[in-house]
Image (cartoon, helix red, strand yellow):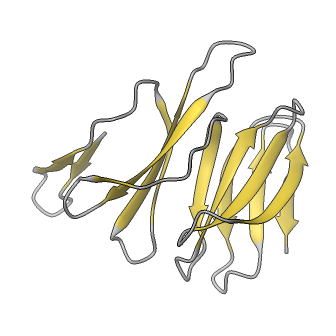
Amino acid sequence: MRLWDVKTGALFQSLAGHIDPVLAIEFSPDGQRLASAAATVAPLNHHGTLKSWDATTGREAAAPPFRFAVSALAFRPDGKALALAYFGDDRLWNIEVLDVRDDRPLRHYVAHRRRITQLAYSPDGAWLVSVSADKTIRCWH
């Protein structure tokens, strides 16, 4: 992955570490952390990796060991939680919300029958919205 300085157009950081294609990235609200998810795209092989990066230095930081293919990420506006949309063992698309301090699961939702394409929090962080290729939008509290 490459980060570019939008003011100058110059390359700011090059982040190397994923083997599979990167499918989702998300900056923390304070801009100090970047979460990225990569996954195999072969049919019926939905394994992936989740990585965390220090956005200022480009160094890889500790991330939860997550083995599923993640399709979307969203930091809660307070920066204390990260939501991930993934294809689970149940053959459905799930959402896992993790505490970013200790990677502890906070919430789990069995969400959609088809790929989740987008996750977003409301400005107050009380609601999480998921958008899916199954042509539905769902709100989670």
Q: Residue at x 35, y 55 (%)?
A: 53
Q: Is residue 67 visible?
A: yes
Q: Nearer the viewer, residue 64 or 94?
A: 64
Q: Residue at x 86, y 56 (%)?
A: 109
Q: Furthest-bottom residue in view?
A: 124
Q: In x, y percent, where is residue 138?
A: 86, 59
Q: Residue at x 57, y 45 (%)?
A: 65
Q: In x, y percent, where is residue 77?
A: 56, 79
Q: Is residue 61 left or right of residue 85?
A: left
Compared with residue 44, is residue 141 higher up or lower down, i.e. above or below? below
Q: Is residue 65 left or right of residue 18?
A: right
Q: In x, y percent, where is residue 41?
A: 60, 19
Q: Is residue 116 visible?
A: no
Q: Is residue 113 left or right of residue 127?
A: right
Count of all numbered marks drawn on residues in the image: 0
Q: Nearer the viewer, residue 8 or 34?
A: 34
